[in-house]
Amino acid sequence: MIIGYLSGAVYPILSLVVWSVFLIFVAILVIRIIYSYGDPNPFGAIGRFGYKIRRLTEKWVYPSARFLATFRIDTRLAPILTILIALVITYFSMSIIHETFRVIDEFGIVTATGNTKAFIGLVIYALLDILVLFIFVRFISSWFVFHQNTFLGFVKRVTDPIMVPAQRLIPTVGMFDISAMIVLLLISFLQMFVANIFGL
């Protein structure tokens, strides 16, 4: 594996920042859980602080609470589900960013060496990377409402030829589009095949 400037120098710093933000987010949600079960006096200083934490995190926790409510599960547990979802999103986001940085670094090296076969392989690999990014964005956007004339609308139109047939075969589980994860796994296998064929 080629380690270039972006993947070797920039990515570790970016990763540290992103995971630090994630840990802060987790800490805030843990505080919310404690206040939810502690049920402090809403008119006291502790109660007012708990209310501020709830307002701060409500837009992130609400989709999880709505999902748990459909199964009649205590919605006070929603922050735990939100933390798990945030962990998955953060992990996959950083994986996509790292892979993008690595491909950019390799493009520079392959262009300098004039290896046409490797260049073609990298182009195919990069296009698959973009497709992975779009499907990942589509998966996250399924939690929110967006208009067709936005970037998310464009992402939906681009990924529809792949995702619509997959969604017909693999139904959603509650609010979760499992088909997106299956498609991402299939693309990752295809990328490994491309890497082997073109010697990346």
Image: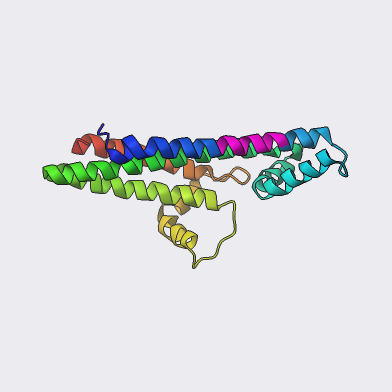
Residue 146 visible in the shown view? yes
x, y (%) of residue 56?
A: 69, 48
Magenta segment, which residues? 22-31
Q: Residue at x 16, y 46 (%)?
A: 111
Q: Is residue 157 above or below residue 81?
A: below
**Image-quadrant location for residue 144:** bottom right
The extreme front residue here reads 45
Left or right: 32, with 25 as reference point? right
| For residue 131, side relative to residue 29 (left or right) | left
Q: Nearer the viewer, residue 1 or 159?
A: 1
Image check: 165 left or right of 47? Answer: left
Please provide percent x and percent y for residue 57. 68, 46
Q: Quadrant of the N terminus?
A: top left
x 49%, y 59%: residue: 152
Rendering quarter of residue 193:
top left
Residue at the outermost bottom position: 149
User: What's the colour scheme?
Assistant: rainbow
Q: Can residue 185 be seen here? A: no
Q: Residue at x 44, y 49 (%)?
A: 135
Q: Main secondary structure of the magenta part?
A: helix
Q: How many marks?
A: 0
In what quadrant of the picture does the C terminus appear?
Answer: top left
The percent coordinates of residue 72 (x first, y second) are 76, 40
Query: In the image, is 134 to the left or to the right of 42?
Result: left
| Foreground of the two, 171 or 194 | 194
Residue at (19%, 39%) from the top-left corner?
Answer: 198
- Find residue 120 and report its horizontal and vertical position in percent: 19, 47
Question: For this rendering, which residue is in front, 187 or 80?
Answer: 80
